[in-house]
Image (spheres, helix red, strand yellow):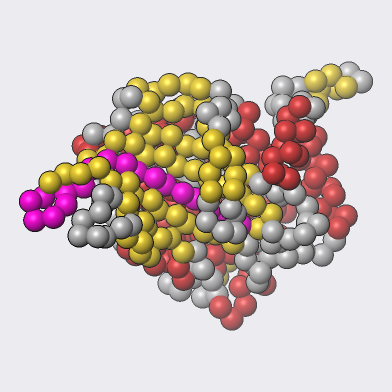
Amino acid sequence: MGRWVVRDLTESDGVEEVAVADADSASAFETAGWAAVRAGAKGTAGVRGLVVDATDGDAMRRAFERVDVVCNCAGEATNLEVMLACADTGTGYVDLGGGFQTTRDQLALHHRFLSAPATAVIGMGASPGTSNVMAALAAAELEEVDSVAISLGRAELAAGSATLPAPDELSALLDQVTGPAITYSDGAFVEVPAMSGQEDLELPEPVGSVRVGHSPHAAVATLPLSLASKGVRTVSCKLGFGRRLMDHMDLLMGLGLASTRPLELDGTPVVPRDLLVSCIRAAEELRGAEAAPEDAMVISVRATGTRAEGRTGQRLPAEVVAECVVRSHPRWLATAGEVGGSAPASIAAQYLAHKVVDAAGVLPPEQAIPLDPYFGELARRGVEVSLTTRRPAVGGRGPERKPA
């Protein structure tokens, strides 16, 4: 995902330089060169490779003193250490999110960033990330919020195309459908099995009908806190796929290939998921030249509550639905997941660098990101968000639908 964050940054006006940092020098310099070549005339930023190990606090602090913002795409396991280095150097911080507990641990660093002072925006991908900002958008239409339900659906569109996502994306998705999930129900956090509470949803085209179930999600760690003043009692996050992909995921899990528990193979410990991801990566390399993906992702956020109506201002029940459609990027040769996950992090990093967001502390997306400018940035990248309000008819009016 980091490759696509770099790609978006190098094609954005106002970005002077992007340093691609990795513990593996070959990976850092290859990614920097890859982005520089593809940015072409559209890019305004210089890009360079930088060797930094996310487990080496001193090295991170030396590197971070030279930049305005760190956008951490190295994975959840590095989030806290990278954040601490940013707090020590007063450097802005953005990441793609982590699990429920990691997110709560990150929020606990709020005072470290206040003292720095510096700003950290955590969980700024597609979901968490755009979904959280959509929840803030929907909640703003209501006086009181009873519940927020986030659903994420994906679909392959090209006939005969590979139905499994890119290797790193697959590993993240397997985390979401195998680990226990946390939901916020009746004012309390509750652990439930992953993919439990399944329901069939009709999402906007081209995704259409999907079956979704509970998945581990950082938004559940922050939205109950952010919307507490509006009385929210229920927050859920569910994930679903098209039938073909779900069949493949079920097969992989049934065979035990989603497991992260090592097995002994001829006296050597082997992690089944690592083997699976390596096999898929090798198959991609054998296919050779980059092929244009054709897929789509829909993020749906439904907020229920009450809304003031008419001249009397009477509060009546209402439901607000925000929907976001992300498609694959033909020029970038990027999947919908790669576009939807990378653009939010790039936008947030630029907001921090340009002081569009400058409140110190550790902030979730729904508290940090300005609504209208953000959705405008997404629209410039071909990602549209719409808002529909369903409420009791007043003077013959039905649902109101408008672009975000």
The residue positioned 12% from the left and 46% from the top of the image is: 314
The one of 244 and 51 positioned closer to us in this rendering: 244
**Most prominent secondary structure in the magenta stretch?**
strand
Q: Tell me, yes or no, whether the highlighted magenta stretch contains residue 307.
A: yes
Residue at the (76%, 33%) spot, across then down = 252
Give the image quarter of residue 259: top right
* In magenta stretch: residue 335: no
Task: Please give the name of the residue rendered at 80% of the width and 45% of the height, measured from the top-left corner.
Answer: 280
Q: Nearer the viewer, residue 21 or 286?
A: 286
Vertical position of residue 324 compared to residue 79: above or below = below
| Residue 119 showing in the rendered view | no
| Percent of width and height locating residue 240 | 59, 41
Q: Is residue 111 above or below residue 28?
A: above
Q: How many marks?
A: 0
In the picture as drawn, the residue positioned furthest to the front comes out as: 396
Q: Is residue 30 left or right of residue 134?
A: right
Residue 176 visible? The answer is: yes
- How far from the left and from the top, in percent, is residue 114? 27, 41
Q: Which quadrant does the C terminus fall into?
A: bottom left
Front in this rendered view, residue 21 or 318: 318
x and y percentages locating residue 177 in the rendered image: 62, 32
Q: Is residue 144 left or right of residue 269?
A: left
Q: Is residue 68 above or below residue 247?
A: below
Nearest the viewer among 259 and 86 is 259
The answer to whether 129 appears left or right of 154 in the picture is left
Toward the left, the furthest residue is 312
Q: Residue 200 falls in which quadrant of the image?
A: top right
Instruction: Give the residues drawn in magenta, as a range.
Output: 296-313
Q: Position of residue 345 (x, y in %)?
A: 48, 54
Residue placed at 59% from the left, 34% from the top?
176
